[in-house]
């Protein structure tokens, strides 16, 4: 049977009219099939490219997931990065320099005399003045104290008694008489829990910098003992979290004894509290603040926080904006309108709040804008979407319809949970060093010490000094226990 392309009409007059019409229809169908085939070929090439890109992204994600110790990566370097250093112009800023210490802080005065003769020509030298120069140095020689502990017995009841100096951290004598001082113990805690050094590296730092011999086990015992003595301060932190009018919780993965766990962080108005639990649920937070807590809570879309029905919620706009921008980057044609409208809506609300914080918009104008934002979001979230990802996002927006613009009505509330993410970030960096905790006792010490040190940092206090004071006051009736937070 001859194909349509091979049919040749030599004499149109000799061909019947019906055959000619059928031939023209076949030619039109053939042209249409060729166009359809070309379109399918182009679609196939596009899908092959997208599949290849998706496979490459999946492989990169798998590799990054296996390289947990690798530094953070934000992609290839920029072709034209900004010039490092200070910005030119009138807002250049002042040049920082080390201020000279007070005369009382100078421990020793050393002379730097002139040479007898000029090293250039050999002529005599005449002194014209003396200029001071200051140098601050670390102590390389450890300070060793000896306490002559007076021991006695009560004449009335026969009870054994011994003296206690304010700088002592323990009453142990005999085989345990050689100890590490309170400042050194506080430094061990800070190096391990704040700066993320393992116990082996902590011992190496003490040996290299201060000539103090310390074992890995001794470092771990110091941390455990400090956490036990700081438990009253941790209770202060929990009480402050419960009394806070605003909370920002977040959580991240953790490891305890090689098994999966979760590290929870809760940032209040004056305190930062941490907890390590086996599950991601908000049970730990409920145990601290109670289910009837009635403040304002800024968090991501984790549904476990919905149990606090008495609280006023603010869904994190940072999370939903990242999600919407990813959808906008993948959208084509008319599908880009929905994510772009959401991005414009959320960013407009954030900019309006920022203008209020700069004094450009009054509190009444800001509060009056919330109904308009809620109405615009309701119109965007209500219609059903043909794209499955859009429909899932719309359901999420609709479920928490009253929780997206709380920060517009209450500008003191943050629109994102960045405070909790910043509180978790140091722990995530430390997790890359030593992976988590080996035991649940170590996890309990971890959360206590992180809570105390994080609250000190938030309150503008020295965590090193507070830990040292607490170690000295523990078991010493002559010293009061230091208070972490002043009463409200």
Image (cartoon, rainbow, N blue to C red):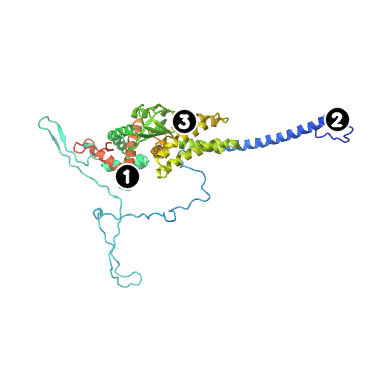
User: What is the count of numbered marks?
Assistant: 3
- Residue named by callout 2: 17
**N-terminal-most mark, 2 or 1:** 2
Looking at this view, is 272 or 315 the one in front? Answer: 315
- Mark 3 in CB contact with mark 1 (< 8 angstroms): no
Give the SS element for disc 1.
helix
Q: Residue at x 32, y 73 (%)?
A: 123
Residue 333 percent coordinates (x, y): 60, 37
Instruction: Compute the Cα span from label 3 to label 1.
Output: 55 Å
Looking at the rendered image, the quarter that the C terminus falls into is top left
Give the SS element for disc 3.
helix
**Front: mark 2 or 1:** 2
Instruction: Compute the Cα span from label 2 to label 3.
Output: 68 Å
- Mark 2 in CB contact with mark 3 (< 8 angstroms): no
Q: Residue at x 57, y 37 (%)?
A: 336
Figure check: 442 above or below 181: above
**N-terminal-most mark, 3 or 1:** 1
Q: Is residue 165 left or right of residue 453?
A: left
Q: Residue at x 52, y 32 (%)?
A: 379
Q: Local crowd at mark 3 within 10 Å, few (<14), some, or many (≥20)?
A: some
- Residue named by callout 1: 206
Looking at this view, is 347 or 391 the one in front? Answer: 347
Can I make out residue 416 in this image?
no
Figure check: 169 above or below 303: below
Q: Is residue 222 left or right of residue 67?
A: left
Residue 354 percent coordinates (x, y): 43, 42
Give the SS element for disc 2.
helix
Q: Residue furthest left?
A: 155
Residue 326 percent coordinates (x, y): 53, 37
**Front: mark 3 or 1:** 3
Report the disc number at residue 401: 3
Q: Quadrant of residue 468?
A: top left
């Amino acid at each position: 049977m001859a194909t349509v392309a091979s049919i040749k009409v030599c004499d149109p007059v000799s061909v019947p009219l019906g055959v000619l019409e059928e031939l023209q229809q076949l030619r039109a169908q053939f042209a249409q099939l060729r166009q359809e085939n070309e379109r399918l070929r182009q679609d196939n090439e596009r899908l092959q490219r997208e599949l290849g890109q998706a496979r490459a992204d999946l492989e990169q994600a798998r590799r990054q997931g296996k390289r947990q110790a690798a530094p953070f990566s934000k992609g290839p370097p920029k072709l034209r990065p900004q010039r490092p250093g200070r910005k030119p112009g009138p807002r250049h800023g002042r040049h920082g320099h080390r201020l000279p210490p007070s005369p009382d802080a100078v421990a020793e005065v050393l002379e730097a005399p002139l040479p007898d003769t000029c090293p250039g020509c050999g002529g005599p030298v005449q002194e014209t003045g003396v200029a001071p120069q200051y140098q601050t140095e670390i102590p390389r020689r450890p300070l060793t104290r000896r306490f002559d502990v007076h021991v006695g017995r009560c004449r009335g009841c026969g009870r054994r008694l011994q003296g206690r100096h304010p700088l002592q951290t323990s009453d142990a004598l005999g085989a345990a008489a050689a100890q590490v001082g309170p400042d050194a113990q506080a430094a061990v805690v800070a190096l391990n829990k704040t700066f993320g050094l393992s116990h082996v590296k902590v011992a190496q730092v003490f040996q290299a910098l201060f000539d103090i011999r310390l074992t890995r086990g001794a470092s771990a015992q110091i941390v455990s003992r400090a956490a036990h003595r700081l438990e009253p301060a941790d209770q202060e932190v929990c009480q402050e979290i419960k009394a806070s009018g605003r909370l920002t919780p977040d959580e991240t993965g953790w490891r305890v004894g090689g098994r999966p766990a979760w590290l929870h962080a809760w940032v209040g108005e004056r305190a930062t509290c941490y907890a390590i639990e086996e599950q991601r649920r908000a049970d730990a937070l409920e145990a601290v603040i109670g289910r009837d807590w009635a403040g304002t809570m800024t968090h991501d879309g984790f549904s476990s926080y919905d149990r606090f029905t008495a609280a006023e919620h603010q869904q994190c706009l940072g999370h939903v904006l990242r999600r919407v921008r990813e959808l906008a980057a993948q959208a084509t044609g008319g599908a880009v309108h929905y994510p772009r409208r959401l991005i414009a809506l959320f960013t407009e609300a954030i900019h309006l709040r920022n203008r209020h914080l700069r004094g450009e918009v009054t509190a009444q104008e800001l509060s009056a804008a919330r109904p308009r934002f809620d109405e615009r979001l309701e119109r965007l979230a209500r219609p059903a979407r043909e794209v499955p990802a859009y429909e899932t996002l719309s359901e999420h927006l609709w479920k928490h319809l009253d929780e997206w613009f709380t920060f517009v009505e209450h500008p003191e509330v943050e629109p994102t949970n960045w405070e909790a993410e910043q509180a978790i970030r140091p722990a995530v960096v430390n997790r890359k060093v030593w992976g988590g905790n080996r035991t649940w006792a170590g996890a309990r010490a971890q959360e206590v010490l992180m809570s105390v040190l994080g609250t000190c940092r938030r309150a503008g206090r020295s965590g090193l000094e507070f830990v040292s004071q607490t170690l000295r006051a523990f078991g010493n009736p002559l010293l009061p226990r230091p208070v972490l937070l002043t009463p409200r």
